[in-house]
Amino acid sequence: MFKRLLGCVREYKLSTILTLIFITGEVVIEVFIPFVTADMVNRIEKGRPLKEVVLIGLVLFVMAILSLCCGAIAGYTCAKASSGFAKNLRGDLFHKVQTYSFENIDKFSTSSLVTRMTTDVSNVQMSFMMLIRIAIRAPLMLIFSIVMAYIMGGPLATAFVVIVPFLAFGLFIVARNAMPAFRRVFKKYDRLNESIEENVRGMRVVKGFSREEYEKDKFGKAAENIRADFTKAERIVACNNPLMQICVYFNMVFVLLIGSKLIVTTGGELINVGEISAMLTYGMQILMQLMMISMIFVMLTMSLESMKRIYEVLSENSSLTNPENALSEVSDGSVEFDNVSFKYSEKAEKYALSNINIKIPSGSTVGILGGTGSSKSTIVQLIPRLYDATSGSVKVGGRDVREYDLDVLRGEVAMVLQKNLLFSGTIRENLKWGNENASDEEIIEACKLAQAHEFVSGFPDGYDTKIEQGGTNVSGGQKQRLCIARALLKKPKILILDDSTSAVDTKTDMLIRRGFKEYIPETTKIIIAQRVASVKDADIIVVMDGGRISDVGNHEELLERSEIYREVYSQQTGGGDMQ
């Protein structure tokens, strides 16, 4: 795990190494400052000439400036290294998520992935910064200070060594008790983010049912749960401070009492005033570094769970992979389902699709009709390998979809999903997702075919109109037509419309379908719809029921033999002419 995370340092290795070098320089200088100060105190005590004292003072001034410069440079390089590390880590996480199949995303949940790329990365960034700066500085300062304390104070410095095991044991107890609380907090963060995401996306529904107070109460409880766990964890971690204070004052009292007694009894021969002052300084340095180490220990304890959560994402392999010698070309838009069954996870007891067998010729128009929960959307998601069939095979262009390079396959399949999504940016930028090199003429032609050009032209800025996040400044029908135009610009071999004309009127729906025949006659068009009118003229109509194919045929054939189709048609036409 640590090796994988540290691999994200990459181009910031130099900044990391420079931080370590300048931190070491700062430590060495700071350790020698008390030694030189003690010499100056002794010279003053012995009445040495002012010139000597001023000279030592100048040396101390130069050492302080050098220490300051080393610290400042180390601070700059450390900030650059830690920020760069976090940037790379977020980038690696984002790129990894882009390779995930829907099955992988379902495993983590969207809110959890967002938490891992934000809160968890920030925690790990803080730990990395502390590791390359304080975690190097503190141990070095601790070791050098103990060595110098022995040089200056002899056996008196043993008091510093005695305290270290006591402090280490205390820190271990603190970490062991705080870790479970931090672990619970991060899991609750996922649920809190999920609640926020759900609430913001469903704001219209919340307001429509006047459920603001209920949602605020639900959010308050979730936030209170996090506060309670954090309070418990922080209460445990807060024990570090009194523990450190005990050690600091014990050393100060011990050095002053024993040191003063030795000065009085030996007349300053064993230890003098300058050495006592240096011992106090070294003692403070030692204990301050121990305090820094305790802070690092707490931060690492808190971020260890974040590291594990990030590593889970980075080490997760997509359930969909490219085969060796993958096919790089899709010959045509024919689709065949050969005894296909599918369930969303291995643990699922029920199959979403069972024994699906159907052949769709290239260039044909296929309608898929069925009630809610009949797995209409599921069946088309197997064509571009958003999921893989659990058993059986799905073929495109006469070859199993698992034989194709994923990018090649998905490049030839355009999907307009049931939940239409537009991204922040202009209408033109959104449309160019279908073809980034599309000319203005091609964009306008696609929009005319999708019946979108008229309303886009009505905007003051036309195709340069800004789309707000989630497309909230356009209506549902406008959003659907823009998404259809985006798919048309792709000029795919297979076009899938997943109930994507539900928000437009019947006339517009008919005009869009007529445009398909004229603009992309060789493209296989698969239309999932709730309205019989949307699929009535299709070459093939597939009637789905409970994850199975109930019947296949054209409009007239299904009216004769399919009870489901006949019932839906009768309900939608008000029991009119069945022919």
Image (cartoon, grey):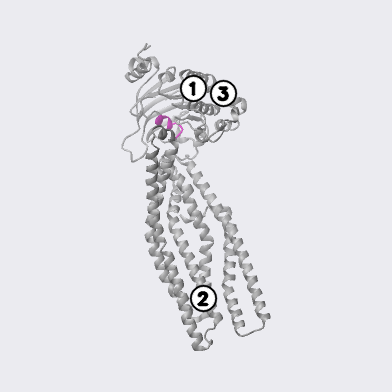
Work out which residue is located at the far right of the displayed protein and give it. 51
Residue tagged 2: 280
Where on the picture, by quarter, is residue 465? Answer: top right
CA gap between label 3 and label 2 equals 80 Å
Q: Can residue 459 be seen in this view?
A: yes
Numbered-mark total: 3
CB within 8 Å, label 3 to label 1: no
> Could you tell me which quadrant the C terminus lies in?
top left
Which dot, 3 or 1, sits closer to the camera?
Answer: 3
In the image, 300 versus 339, the foreground residue is: 300
- Mark carried by residue 363: 1
SS type, badge 1 = loop
| Residue furthest bottom as drawn | 266
Residue 429 x %, y %: 58, 33
> Which mark is on residue 453?
3
Residue at (64, 77) in percent of width and height:
56
Q: Residue at x 50, y 29 (%)?
A: 414
Figure check: 178 above or below 486? below
Callout 2 touching callout 1 (CB < 8 Å): no
Q: Position of residue 39 (x, y in %)?
A: 60, 80
Mark 3: secondary structure: helix
Q: Residues within 10 Å of mark 3 (few under 14, many from 20)?
A: many
